[in-house]
Image (spheres, grey):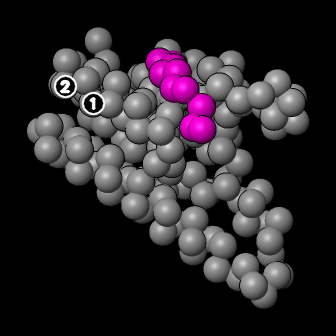
Amino acid sequence: MYETILVPTDGSAGSELAVDHALDLARRYDATLHLVYVVDTDVVNHYAGIDAIEGVEGALEAQGAEALDAAAERAEDGGIVAERHVVEGSPHEAIIDAVAMVGADLVVMGTERKSGEYRRLLGSVTERVVRMVDVPVHVVKAKAEE
């Protein structure tokens, strides 16, 4: 049913739970897993030119590499082929682009409950991806971190 599964991850509790679900689905369908970390260019651009935060992009890339390495190690331990991708952009747009880039036929994403005010201000990356991609999106809900 599924051959190529895309899983955006940032190492958060919600995305780690999504990785668990994606691993199970990849095992069931003998699918290739594509793990994606987005370096949020909005954050990088916000701090551009500030000497104390000059290494923001590098720090985000390092955080992404750690998240991808941890998820890939779990996949490999389960005998699942996992490819890693670090992409840049606005998170929802970069994820949508990654779906096309890898030819994903399923996206598995985690989401955590946020306050109404937070959602009104920032929206939800997961909600935007669900609305904008043409492939099924498996949403894994996690409790918000205390």
Residue 107 seen in this snapshot: no
Residue under label 2: 27
**Numbered marks: total:** 2
**Which secondary structure dominates the residues rendered in magenta?**
strand
Instruction: Establish if 13 lies above or below 130.
Output: below
- Looking at the image, do the residues carrying marks 2 and 1 touch, with CB atoms under 8 Å apart? yes
Q: Quadrant of the N terminus?
A: top left
Instruction: Establish if 58 lies above or below 26.
Output: below
**Furthest residue in direction front, as rendered:** 146
Check residue 117 for magenta coloring. no
Q: Which residue is nearer to you in this view: 83 or 102?
A: 83
Residue 61's x, y, as percent?
A: 52, 66
Instruction: Establish if 15 lies above or below 105.
Output: below
Residue 75's x, y, as percent?
A: 23, 41
Q: What residue do we see at 57% from left, 18% from top? A: 134
The span picked out in magenta is 137-146
In which quadrant of the rendered view does residue 117 lie?
top right
Instruction: Establish if 140 lies above or below 12.
Output: above
Residue 87's x, y, as percent?
A: 55, 55
- Residue 89 — which label? none
**Furthest residue in direction top, as rendered:** 1
Disc 2 marks a residue whose amino acid type is Arg
In which quadrant of the rendered view does residue 45 lie?
bottom right
Crowd tier of the residue under label 2, counting other residues whose Cα lies within 10 Å: few below 14, some 14–19, many 20 or above: some
Residue 123 lies left or right of residue 3; in this view the side is right
- SS category of the residue bearing label 1: helix
Q: Which residue is nearer to you in this view: 29 or 49?
A: 49
Residue under label 1: 23
Q: Quadrant of the C terminus?
A: top right
Residue 30 lies left or right of residue 117; in this view the side is left
Residue 125 lies left or right of residue 122; in this view the side is left
Q: What residue do we see at 71% from left, 48% from top? A: 90
